[in-house]
Amino acid sequence: MEFAEISVLIRLAVGAVATFFAILLWSKTRDTAWVLVVIGTLISYTEIIFSTLVDLKIVRPDAFFLFGPEGFPLLHTVLVNLPLVFYAVGFIVVISRRRLP
């Protein structure tokens, strides 16, 4: 096995464990900040799966480009950046909760 294959397997395994615990946390809490972090984690694992499917040539990435095959990779860009948006909003919720009496 090459390093790239091992790296993909490790990334899938760690992402699966993180997603499993995120779903467990989601069922235990209804706190807005934690729910946003959980959603970010789920979307992050979606990106891992999508990247793996592209690497295995099961999914063609150019099918998800905006403005044709040489255009903007919309789906990949959204899947990479959306978890960070959810994390940031979750952090803002916690900060605003701590600052306001």
Image (cartoon, grey):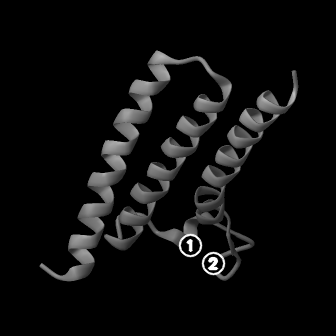
Q: Position of residue 76 (x, y in %)?
A: 58, 64
* Element at label 2: loop
Left/right of residue 10 with respect to residue 30 in the rendered view: left
Q: Which residue is mark 1?
A: 62
Q: Quadrant of residue 50?
A: bottom left
Residue at the spot 63% in from the left edge and 35% down from the top edge: 36
Q: Which mark is residue 69?
A: 2
Residue at the spot 24% in from the left edge and 63% down from the top edge: 9
Q: Give amino acid for label 1.
A: Asp
- Residue furthest to the left in view is 1
Seen in the picture, residue 24 relative to 17 is either above or below; the reply is: above
Q: Position of residue 57 (x, y in %)?
A: 35, 71
Disc 1, disc 2: CB below 8 Å? Answer: yes
In which quadrant is the N terminus drawn? bottom left
Q: Give amino acid for label 2.
A: Pro
Q: Position of residue 61 (x, y in %)?
A: 51, 70
Give how far apart the Cα atoms at labels 1 and 2 are. Answer: 5 Å
Sequence order check: which comes first, mark 1 or mark 2? 1
Question: 67 or 101: which is nearer to us?
Answer: 101
- Residue furthest to the right in view is 100
Task: Give neighbour class at mark 1: few <14, some 14-19, many 20+ (Cα, 10 Å).
Answer: some
Q: Position of residue 27 (x, y in %)?
A: 45, 18
* Element at label 1: helix
Residue at the spot 70% in from the left edge and 42% down from the top edge: 91
Seen in the picture, residue 27 relative to 91 is either above or below; the reply is: above
Task: Give neighbour class at mark 2: few <14, some 14-19, many 20+ (Cα, 10 Å).
Answer: few
